[in-house]
Every structure is written in C-alpha cells, then in structure tokens.
Amino acid sequence: MAKNKIMVNFQKKIKDRQIRIAVVGLGYVGFPLALEFAKKGVKVTGIEIDHDRLKSISNKISYISDISTSELKKVISGGNFKASGNFSDIKDADAILICVPTPLKGRYLPDISFIKTAVEQVALHLKNKALVVLESTTYPGTTEEEILPIFEKHGFRHERDFFLCFSPERIDPGNKKFPVQKIPKVMGGLSPLATLLATEIYQIIIKQVVPVSSPRAAETVKLLENTFRLINIGLIDELSMMAHKMKIDIWEVIQAASTKPFGFMPFYPGPGVGGHCIPKDPLYLHWKAKSFGFHSRFIKLASDLIRYMPEYVVKRVNQVLDSRNCRLKGAKILVMGVTYKKDIKDLRKSPSLDVINSLKKHGARVSYFDPIIPFLKLKGLDLESVRLSDKKIKEFDCLIIATDHSGIDYLRVLKSAKLIFDARNVYKGKHREKVERL
C-alpha cells in the first residue's frame, strides 16, 4: 500500500470517526487519555489487567482524582468507551497507545518488564497497518532497541506491517489548568510517516503536536523535563538546609528572587518528592548514560539530596523538641498529610510515609491525619487517620505539616497545637512562637 494511501485512509477514518483506538493501561496516564478520545466520538477500548480497576469501571466509579465518577458515567453511557482485561479486544484497533508503569528495581535499575509484556500481547493481536505509540516513560533507545525487535520477532516489519512511535506522557495529576487535552504532545516516530500518522491521531484531542526526529529524542524529552525539576528541587532543598544553618529565611529569599522578571524560576523546599515521575525518571537517564561511559553527577546528587529530606525533617523536629526539653523518643507526633501532592489521592513514593517510618525508628509515637486517606496499609504501616478535633490536637507534642491539603483550617489547628513543624510554608513566617519552618 502506498504511503500516501495509508495517510489518506487514516485521515478519512478520523474525519468519519471510524478510527478505533486501544489504550493499554488505564492508570493516571491511560485512563484520562482514553476518555478524552471517547468524548470526541472515537471508539476506544481500554485494556487493564488490574481486576479492581475493571470492577470500578464496570460499576461506573472512578478511581482517579482527575476523572469524576459523573464524568465516567457520562462517557460510558455515550457508548464509545469500554474496558477489558483481554488483549484480543485490540484486534480491530487502528492505533494502540501503551501507557503501562515503568518502575525501578532498587534505586537505579530501570524495570521495563511491564512494557515488554504489554508489547508481546499487542504483537499477538495487532491489526495490519496499525499504529503503536508507547507513552510509558523509559530510557533513550527503548523503542528502537527493545520494542521494535519484539514486533520483528512476531514477523512484523516497520512501515510494511505497522508503525511505531514514542510520545512521552505529560499528565500532571490534579492540575486543572492543564488537563491532558491542553498539554502539547511530543511525537517521535520510527519514520516520518509514523510521526505523521500519530500526529493525526492525537490531534483529535490535542491542538498542538510537536514532532521530533526520532523515538530516542522523544524519550529524552521526558527525561529532560523531569531531570530539570529534580535538580532544581535538589538545589533548593540543599539551599534550605544551608540557609537554616546561616539563620536565613529561605522562603523570604525565594519570594524576593521571584520578583526578577527573567532568568529565575522559583522552586520550593519540602519533605521530599513523590509521585510517578520526578523520583524515578531521571534515574533512567542516569542508568542509560552509564552504558556510554558517562556518569551524570548532577542527577545522582540531586536524587540523593531529595532522598535525604524526610530524614532531615525528622532531624529538625528532633532539634526543636530538644530545645523545648522534649525528647523525640516517646513524643507524640501527628503527621498532617500523607499523599505525595496536595489534594491528590495518590501515595506513590510519598515522602510523608518515609517521615512516618523515620519517626517510628526514632521511637516517636506517630499518628497521622489526611482528609482523603482514611487508612494506611503499606510500607510496613498500619494506621488510621485521626479525627482532627481541638482536643485531639492538644494531645500531640508536635504536628508536622508534610502535605498542605486545601480545606483545612490551619489557624484553628494552630490555636490548639503545642508546636508545629511546617514543611510546606503554610504559615508563611507568622506565629513563630509555635511554628518552626523547614
């Protein structure tokens, strides 16, 4: 089939809304993506192997904060979206978007086993001339060195039988200003035609698609974005520790520096970094660079600094308690906020959990409060969120604001608290007789 005929067929199917899309992995990336296509009148099949997620979808209950249950019900009732645990249901898909997890083994070793497993299954049911787009964050070279050979093993040849691209996900959970459809999409195909086909697909829901020269370039784009954030967060964390030693208010310094209209972007210190991107993604680049004999010192240093922050928070709490003739061992501590990000029901790599475990190792009696996490049963913890009453607050020797959820009356908390360690600058330098800031 001539290349221009393939493009014309794709364009016609898109125009007539006859194009069929499969999204493999209905997590924080794949689920919003699938629903956006369905809203535009595209028939979408979501593939998910997690039975709890499939059950939630079957019951029309959303398990992701960026998708309301009412929105999910509306999309499902529209008839353009269905979820399945069977890969054979992708057999009619013109485009397959792979959005599966890419964790780390230990601290530094990438784990792309979920990608490989998904691709193996896709290859068993791939429609002729279908487009495959990998969105899972990974190291440069994965698409060409790992994914393409799997398809070739199954007898597929690129541009003869199928088309392959990489497009890095850019989902920011809880960001109302920039939902998936408003974030420009980077696209790197194995060939110019693959890039064009993918561009046609994604422009159904996204206005701006940014083509790059190769999958390798697209893979590196995502890693650059999150490495930039990792290094700057690590830098401001180190500066906050230095500023504390020098009796300088780092929050005041950041605020003043932010008035410069060029050449500065504010980053803020905190108890650590969580989520699925920043703690992990730069280490994929760090690992890959080593195979070229290059040691990325900035990435490792920033990662180590951020990893230390939960322990640093506990160290500071210990110091302030000691200054008040109270020992950390045996002290009653309330950690406020356990999700990795404010107002987001997501515990992945949350530094609050590390703060709690560190406090427990130091002998503190630890409780937590979080308005959206009623109980904790992970990382060796088995706790229930306390009821945040004036009487309850008075029982604690110190409160640690680890995640600054909205909707909490922090002034009311302050009135009843004996001591607060504010790791999120909630009190902005006020009430210094009761508040110690990071």
Image (cartoon, rainbow, N blue to C red):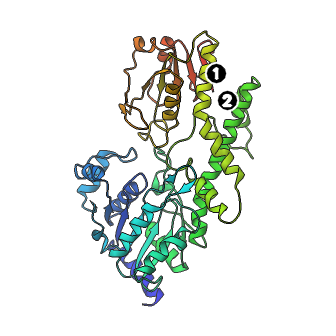
Query: Which circle marks residue 429 in the picture?
Result: 1
Specify whether residue 60 is in view: yes
Q: Residue at x 38, y 75 (%)?
A: 123
- Choose the circle earlier in sequence order: 2 or 1: 2
Q: CA distance from mark 2 to mark 1?
A: 8 Å
Q: Which one is in front, 276 or 427?
A: 276
Q: Secondary structure at mark 2?
A: helix
Which residue is at the front of the view, 79 or 148?
A: 148
Amino acid carrying mark 2 in the image: Trp
Q: Between residue 292 and residue 313, name the one nearer to us.
A: 292
Q: Which residue is mark 2?
A: 251
Q: Are marks 2 and 1 in contact (CB under 8 Å)?
A: yes
> Disc 1 marks which amino acid?
Gly
Crowd rating for badge 2 (residues with CA inside 10 Å; few <14, some 14–19, many 20+): some
At which x and y percent is residue 149?
48, 77
> Where is the N terminus found, in terms of image quarters?
bottom left
User: Compared with residue 210, is residue 256 higher up or lower down, i.e. above or below?
Assistant: above
Residue 13 on image: x %, y %: 36, 76
Left or right: 46 as drawn, with respect to 133: left
